[in-house]
């Protein structure tokens, strides 16, 4: 009887949890159907100010009061002199245009959906940038779909078309489609052990035709056009289809090679377009990158003479999406608790 009582109590709790979850999910669905997708959010922040705050904090921790006092005195003196020089240069109409640096971070996935944010960031920069400015893209990607990374590379080309300097820094990896984007730059930086290259094309798929035949399952596929489908996952592939598929891959590879050669004509393209990848130091020897340097060191160097700004565009989640995430988390937690309780009852 005690067992039945515990079992009944467990069932009652489980039903209550399920009903509560259904009510929450139903409310989220109703709310989501009424709300539009969240709007994009553009953020522009000063990297120069961030670096200055870090430096000042370090000084206060490491310098004595006398050293800090002397430093501040020298700093004010230098600022007055710089202001005087700037005023004099402006009066003589000989002021040097130093320019700004705009930093964009691109971490690409297989489907390259991040290009949607990249296009907004570049559009923003081009609306305010001047010829003396520079764009630094901190890029990280192992590649992905051809059309996605082709569009991403075209977005970067927009910067060069406006005669604005484009620098790309690779701290970890820029391979395949990632390198397609990288080669567009006027200057390419790479960390010593960053993975660079892989100028090649790959496509693969499983084929379940033998398994279907073994299970007496028939599969039909009808097409109009000799090569509407070359290879299929469920049908029986033939040599003609395989050959056509390989031809298409080779065509894409030739386009890839031509694109890289156009932007880095000094490369021995046949030497580097084998699908291999190299680490930063070797990639520099081959001409795939220009300088062995991390993005951090490059930014510190730029910060000595220029103002640096981060530009980031992201899609803001609406209320329904936030509730959806919360509902999923609650569902997951409830399931774990319910499962744990059931194990303790029936062990």
Image: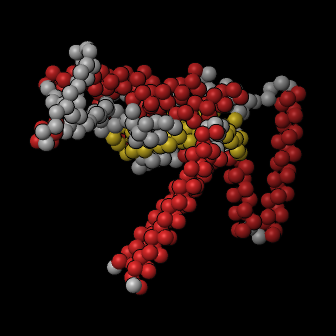
Q: Position of residue 117 (x, y in %)?
A: 57, 36
Q: Quadrant of the N terminus?
A: bottom left
Residue 183: name its quadrant. Answer: top left
Q: What is the basis of the colouring in this image?
A: secondary structure
What residue is shown at x 44% (from left), y 80% (from top)?
A: 5
Residue 326 image point, x, y percent: 58, 56
- Name the residue at 23% across, 34% down: 233
In this orientation, which residue lies closer to the viewer: 171 or 209? Answer: 209
Camera sees residue 152: yes
The quadrant in which the C terminus is found is bottom left
Q: Is residue 25 above or below residue 174?
A: below
Residue appearing at x 83%, y 47% in the figure: 79
Q: In the image, is residue 81 above or below residue 7?
A: above
> In which image quadrant can residue 95 be found?
top right
Q: Position of residue 173 (x, y in %)?
A: 43, 44
Is residue 194 shown left or right of residue 60? left
Residue 242 appears left or right of 156: left
User: Image quarter for residue 336?
Assistant: bottom left
Question: Is residue 309 at least partly visible in the picture?
Answer: no
Rendered location of residue 164, percent (x, y): 62, 26
Count numbered badges in the picture.
Answer: 0
Q: Is residue 18 left or right of residue 250?
A: right
Q: Residue furthest bottom?
A: 2
Of 186 and 195, which appears nearest the observer?
195
Q: Residue furthest front?
A: 1
| In the image, farthest residue toward the top | 225
**Which residue is at 82% across, 62% downward?**
70
Q: Is residue 300 above or below residue 161?
A: below
């Amino acid at each position: 009887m005690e067992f039945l009582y515990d079992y009944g109590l467990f069932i009652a709790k489980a039903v209550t949890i399920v009903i509560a979850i259904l009510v929450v999910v139903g409310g989220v669905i109703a709310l989501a159907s009424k709300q539009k997708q969240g709007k994009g959010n553009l953020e522009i922040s000063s990297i120069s100010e961030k670096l200055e705050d870090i430096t000042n904090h370090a000084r206060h921790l490491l310098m004595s009061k006398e050293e800090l006092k002397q430093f501040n005195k020298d700093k004010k003196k230098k600022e007055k002199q710089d202001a005087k020089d700037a005023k004099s240069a402006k009066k003589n109409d000989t002021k040097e245009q130093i320019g700004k640096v705009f930093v964009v971070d691109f971490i690409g996935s297989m489907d390259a959906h991040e290009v949607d944010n990249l296009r907004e960031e570049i559009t923003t920069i081009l609306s305010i940038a001047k010829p003396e400015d520079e764009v630094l893209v901190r890029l990280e990607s192992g590649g992905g779909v051809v059309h996605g990374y082709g569009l991403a590379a075209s977005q970067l080309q927009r910067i060069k078309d406006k005669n604005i300097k484009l620098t790309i820094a690779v701290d970890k990896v820029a391979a395949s489609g990632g390198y397609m984007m990288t080669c567009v730059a006027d200057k390419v930086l790479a960390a010593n052990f960053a993975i660079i290259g892989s100028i090649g094309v790959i496509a693969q798929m499983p084929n379940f035709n033998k398994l279907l035949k073994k299970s007496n399952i028939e599969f039909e596929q009808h097409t109009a056009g000799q090569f509407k489908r070359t290879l299929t996952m469920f049908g029986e592939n033939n040599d003609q289809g395989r050959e056509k598929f390989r031809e298409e891959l080779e065509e894409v590879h030739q386009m890839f090679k031509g694109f890289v050669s156009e932007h880095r004509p000094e490369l021995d393209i046949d030497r580097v377009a084998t699908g291999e990848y190299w680490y930063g130091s070797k990639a520099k020897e081959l001409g795939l990158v220009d300088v062995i340097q991390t993005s951090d060191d490059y930014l510190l160097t730029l910060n000595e003479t220029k103002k640096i700004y981060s530009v980031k565009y992201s899609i803001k989640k609406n209320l329904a999406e936030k509730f959806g995430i919360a509902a999923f988390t609650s569902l997951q937690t409830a399931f774990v608790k319910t499962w744990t309780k059931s194990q303790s009852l029936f062990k």
